[in-house]
Image (cartoon, rainbow, N blue to C red):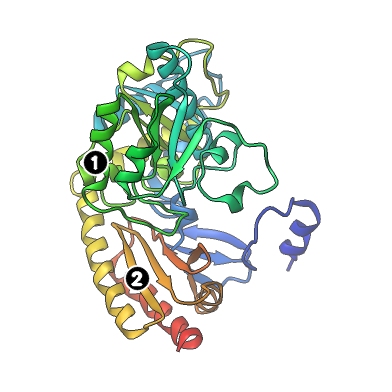
Amino acid sequence: MENWMDRADRVVMQTYGRQPLVLVKGEGCRVWDDAGREYLDFVAGLAVCNLGHAHPRVARAAAEQLTTLVHVSNLYYTPPMVELAEALVAHTFADRVFFCNSGAEAVEGLIKLCRRWSREKHGPGRHRIICMLNSFHGRTLGALSATGQEKFQQGFEPLLPGFAFVPFNDLAALEAAVDEATCAVLLEPIQGEGGVNVPDPEYLPGVRRLCDRFGLLLALDEVQTGMGRTGRLFAHEHFGVVPDVLATAKGLANGLPMGALLSTEEVAKAFVPGTHASTFGGGPVIAQAALTVVQTLTAPGFLATVREKGEYLEKRLTDLARRFPVITRVRGLGLMWGLELSREGAPLVAAARERGLLINCTQGNVIRLLPPLIIAREELDRGLELLARAMEAVCS
């Protein structure tokens, strides 16, 4: 058996603290390593494989397009790109869509669009974007500058100017931060990398009202919370608000690299030919795969089943917290959940992996559960059983 980890460590940049696991195959909610061992996957590629691994319809759509037309650049129109944009517009607030390759790239486009719109509407001077502490928007320089966690920014200074930060879920602090230079408010409806932080029900509607009052754009980062993850196509729908611009990616093409920037017509007018671009954005193969994802997610009843599974998972996790007091808080929505621990979470991640369950830890002590949306109740039960065994070994 080849030692893939040793080979990777010799040639791949050391930017990830990878798990000691070489994965070679995936199907549905399960993956297999190079020794043939099976794992139940409650990470789903960090909320990317929302329809599970090797989804047959998505795979077939991409494979067929690979033999038809792979790439021509955005100098030309292609049917998959047009049909995908039409589908997103039909099922969201948006009038216009820009395609790119990742969440960070979508956020970069969002920042540029907000500033360009403000300059066109108000003239120079209104360029500042208010962001949230504990947020995460990506690793590129603009997205990193908008991220409210210093640990990700260390060593990359100077960051881009024009961003201010206030506590998440605090309307008074947000209002106090607005000044004559402010053009937009950027936030995640639920903070994912920040620890699966869910706001109070009145928070997002309050942010929307504040933006309307001061003439600001409401810009949402739904890179992780989008594409059905919370039981709605996008998480903001739970709170009854409509954004002006939105960045999404991750689950959009179920494992293939695609991001999208969604916008109202008024704001989208700020982008004209030459102001923004992406060579690979909306390419035919990935657009065809993403179209299949959108069609699957928006089929009658699909998202309702995600919400039902989310309610079931919440009850089971609450029971687990009663059994293991080391779990101090359970929070989430749909199939996006965080278990806050009173101790470090890394040993639990390792113990779960040893028992055949893949989970993730963020913020050092929050176990994040992101199973595929297609997961069966029996698989949820099995995953929770394995998690409980791991907690017995590590936390009792």
386 up-or-down from 5: above or below: below
Residue 298 visible (yes or no): no
Q: How busy is the neighbourhood of tag 1: few (under 14 within 10 Å), some, or many (20 plus)? A: some
Q: In the depicted view, which residue is nearer to us: 301 or 15?
A: 15
- Residue that numbered label 1 is attached to: 206
**Location of the C terminus (image quadrant):** bottom left
**Location of the N terminus (image quadrant):** bottom right
Percent of width and height locating residue 307: 23, 56
The residue located at (65%, 61%) in the rendering is 17
Looking at the picture, which amino acid does disc 1 mark? Gly
Looking at the picture, which amino acid does disc 2 mark? Arg
Tag 1's secondary structure? helix
- Residue that numbered label 2 is attached to: 329
The residue located at (62%, 46%) in the rendering is 153
Name the disc covering residue 249, or none. Answer: none
Q: CA distance from mark 1 to mark 2?
A: 25 Å
Q: How busy is the neighbourhood of tag 2: few (under 14 within 10 Å), some, or many (20 plus)? A: some
